[in-house]
Amino acid sequence: MDKEDDPSRRPESPLATLSSPATENCPGPHQNRRPLVVYCRDCDEALCETCFIQLHNGHRHASVDDVAVELREQLKADADRLATVALEYAERLSIMQVGPHLKSL
Ligand SMILES: [Zn+2]
Ligand SMILES: [Zn+2]
């Protein structure tokens, strides 16, 4: 009878497990949570439709999905370029290492 272990008094609230971060919410100056669906190319920002219309009217925009694809392709291209540059540097380094000033030691 002296047990005070109440199973309903758990530290975690059921709400914490319910919120899914699948869609990011816009931090803009509006009450409702809105998903980030528009990407403003002029400001380099992801926005909800409301913020775009109110704060970025007339700016160039794209859908966030399109931009995500673009960024992924750009990253791939950058990685390819970096690999080429790294190879070039490796070649230059190997040339320097067999250079004459190593032999003068
Ligand atoms: Zn917003
Ligand atoms: Zn903008």
Image (tube, grey):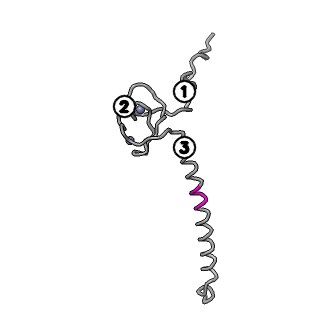
Q: Residue at x 54, y 43 (%)?
A: 68
Mark 1 vs mark 2: in front: 2
Compared to residue 105, the image places residue 86 above or below, namely above
Query: Considering the numbered disc 3 on the image, is that residue within a helix, a strand or a loop?
Result: helix
Q: Position of residue 40 (x, y in %)?
A: 43, 41
Query: Considering the numbered disc 2 on the image, is that residue within a helix, a strand or a loop?
Result: loop
**Circle 2 residues within 10 Å: few <14, some 14–19, many ≥20:** few
Compared to residue 35, the image places residue 60 above or below, namely below
Stretch of the chain drawn in magenta: 77-81
Mark 3 vs mark 1: in front: 3
Mark 3 vs mark 2: in front: 3
For disc 3, the marked residue is 68
Q: Is residue 60 left or right of residue 3?
A: left
Q: Disc 3 to disc 2, how far (Cα)?
A: 24 Å
Disc marking residue 29: 2
Disc marking residue 19: 1
Cβ of disc 2 within 8 Å of ligand 1? yes
Q: Residue at x 58, y 62 (%)?
A: 82
Residue 31, magenta (yes or no): no
Amino acid tagged 1: Ser
Q: Is residue 73 left or right of residue 54?
A: right
